[in-house]
Amino acid sequence: VAKIRLGILGATGMAGRSAVIHEENLKQKGQSYASLELVTGSPQSQGKNLGEVFKEKERDLSTRYSFWNQRSCPESYSQMKVHGLDAEKISKKVDYVISALPSAVAKEIEPKLRERGVNVFSNASEFRWKNDIPLIMPEVNPDQIKRVNEQSTKGVQVNNPNCTTAGFTPVLKALERFGLEKVNITTFQAISGKGDKVSGSEYASNIKGNVVDDWKRETIQWRGEEVRA
Ligand SMILES: NC(=O)c1ccc[n+]([C@@H]2O[C@H](COP(=O)([O-])OP(=O)(O)OC[C@H]3O[C@@H](n4cnc5c(N)ncnc54)[C@H](OP(=O)(O)O)[C@@H]3O)[C@@H](O)[C@H]2O)c1
């Protein structure tokens, strides 16, 4: 089977780097359906090698946070050149993109790519509330993919829901057949949900010491039992 030609937009960011690692994992497992042909970043990263930017970003995070588990760029992609967001050029190189761009940037480029025949899988929130763009969780509502037929562009788009929804809906789906009636949900966002901005001083200065250690240390008594604060 011929592999699809894939691009990762925002490949240098927090979510994009995860997508790059995911592609490598699929390859290692012999489940790769795509050939990664293009990676993009902001003007700051353009022209550099993906491996170089990857290393800088992960190093910044581990400098700020002692608990950060530094990730490495897969060897096979580390020499890829980071490109900019030129819809015309992208559409010549790839047929599909995974978009891990900030919403404001996704808003501009994703429609241009669809018009040029590129199929877009987006992590960005920008088009999540558009009726003809389905939010797909493969474990939950794969049948909704048919709704891309309502789209009038040459390329089509599906989005994923926000990360908390993506986490709990497969569990609810599995429980559905037992007659689930009501669910109370409280969600907490990890700081990594803010992307690489967490390597800036704003977040680090709000966290004293090592969060993991503090979490273990700070316990309180509640109804006679020791619980974590
Ligand atoms: N972090 C998460 O856990 C998470 C989970 C689910 C969904 N998302 C969504 O995924 C998207 C990316 O989030 P993130 O956390 O990965 O953010 P991030 O770490 O800030 O990464 C943003 C990416 O977009 C690129 N970029 C920024 N401005 C650009 C511009 N003007 N032109 C071209 N490229 C630009 C960045 O390039 P540089 O590296 O060169 O700056 C980087 O590759 C967001 O829409 C977010 O809501 C994030």
Image: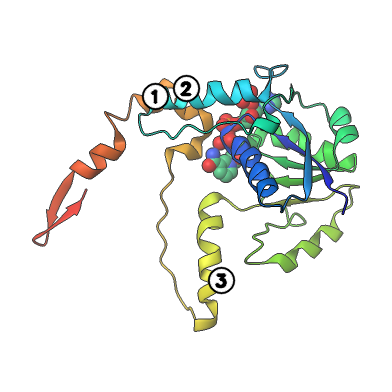
Q: Are marks 2 and 1 in contact (CB under 8 Å)?
A: yes
Element at label 1: helix
Q: Which residue is mark 3?
A: 173
* Residue designated by label 2: 60
Name which residue lies at 48% across and 23% down: 59
Q: Which residue is mark 1?
A: 64
Is residue 122 visible in the rendered structure shown here? yes
- Tell me which residue sits at (76%, 33%) in the image: 108
Q: Is residue 7 above or below residue 170?
A: above
| SS at badge 3 | helix
In contact (CB < 8 Å): disc 2 and disc 3: no
Residue 214 lies in quadrant: top left
Place of residue 127 in the rendered image (x, y in percent of width and height, measured from the top left): 70, 47
In three-dimensional space, the C-alpha distance between marks 2 and 1, rounded to whole angstroms, equals 6 Å
Identify the residue at image location x=31%, y=30%.
207
Q: CA distance from mark 2 to mark 3?
A: 38 Å
| Mark 1 or mark 3, earlier in chain | 1
| Residue type at the position of mark 2 | Asp
